Amino acid sequence: MKRIGVLTSGGDTPGMNSAIRAVFKEGVARGHTVMGIYHGFRGLIEGRVEQLRHENVENIMHKGGTVLRTARSAEFMTDEGLKKAINVARAYSLDAIIIIGGDGSYRGAKVLFEHGINTIGIPGTIDNDMGYTDFTIGFDTAVNTLTTEIYKIRDTMRAHDRVGVIEVMGRSCGDIALWAGVAGGADIILVPEYPMPWDEAARRLQDNKLRGKLTSIVMIAEGAGKAEDFAQYVRTHTNVEIKAIVPGYIQRGGNPSAFDRVLASRLGQRAVELVHENKCGRAVGIHRNRIIDVPLDESIALADEFDKKLYDFNNDVLSRF
Ligand code: F6P
């Protein structure tokens, strides 16, 4: 019987709760004790550790955010902070810690593992920027939320013959912009992976207007620039009327999609299985609809692959013919 800690770290994502629930249930089913660590690595440092019980995971599967709360901890990055975290993990006799988060959280998981604390990573970030897994928990929900929003924005842009440029999250990854853009019928998608010069994007909008297409939607990934800056550029160089829209945190909250709930459940189960099998220092993911696990080192090192073909199809075909 083991004591398994579980924490959520970095930006929250819809589906984190489904993963926590799966970890708890699989852990208990295998006879282990599951300890919730509140507020991510910061909570680990501060000893905010409590045994999870059924009531903690009851009725949480469909809720956004994370019942364990989350944080971005600067202290954990210091030697002193790391030492404190290790001491707390030992004081609570944690045999392993399952860490649900993005690449920053994985780096924390890796450092802990190198210092003798068993860790497993579950990919939880809306950004979908982790190369070893086809999908991260929360991405699908964020894309669905934005797709709904785009059609609302399109209605009002169309009523005024305006262009809307929508800035979406993703840090240095353009996946959210790409998928929400394709699903929302965006005319131009701007991503950091393949920067389209703004003069070309502005020319495309001007051309649209000349051929009678008065309403266009531009999706801009935050890594490719700010919507307001792009709008200003277009106003300066064309006679297109354009509005900047930043949906912000609405794309990170809300009920997880069915896909994210199922993905999170599968990943949570596999994470506990790995602990049970004494295979730590690994990250779980999904590839070709199979749950996989790879060493944490590898999960961090693998560069994310951007779907250039889909990007070209949208910008050069779907939006032009
Ligand atoms: O990594 C998830 C994410 O939502 C990014 O897309 C975004 O850049 C960032 O977190 C925002 O971070 P914060 O919650 O600290 O504002």
Image: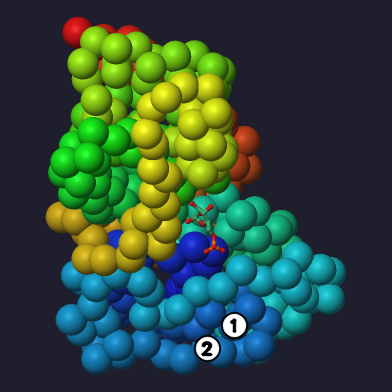
Most distant residue in the right direction: 79
Gap in angstroms between the C-alphas marked 2 and 1: 7 Å
Instruction: Identify the residue at image location x=70%, y=58%.
Output: 111
Q: Which quadrant would the N terminus be assigned to in this image?
A: bottom left
Residue with the mark numbered 1: 43
For disc 2, the marked residue is 49
Q: Amino acid at mark 1?
A: Gly
Question: In the structure shown, which secondary structural element does the residue marked by tag 1 occupy?
Answer: helix
Where residue 46 sits: x, y (%)? 66, 88
In the image shown, does 60 or 182 lie closer to the viewer? 182
Evaluate if marks 2 and 1 touch, with contact meaning CB atoms under 8 Å apart: yes
For this view, does 175 lie left or right of residue 106? left
Q: Which mark is residue 70?
A: none
Q: What is the quadrant of residue 67 in the picture?
A: bottom left
The percent position of residue 33, horizontal first and vertical second, equals: 39, 83
SS type, badge 2: strand
Which residue lies at the image location 52% right of the left edge and 88% below the top edge?
49
- The x, y position of residue 144, in whole percent, is 22, 48
Q: Nearer the viewer, residue 188 or 5?
A: 188
Q: Is residue 173 visible?
A: no
Q: Amino acid at mark 2?
A: Val
When asked about the image quadrant of residue 199, the answer is top right
Q: Which mark's residue is nearer the viewer, 2 or 1?
A: 1
> In what quadrant of the picture does the C terminus appear?
top left
Q: Give x and y (percent) for residue 253.
A: 33, 65
Residue 109, above or below 177: below
**Neighbour tally class for label 2: few under 14, some 14-19, many 20 plus, Cα within 10 Å:** many
Image position of 98 with respect to 2: above or below: above
Q: Which tag, 2 or 1, sits closer to the chain's start? A: 1
Q: Residue at x 52, y 67 (%)?
A: 9
For the point 49% across and 63% down, the residue is 11
37 in relation to 280, above or below = below
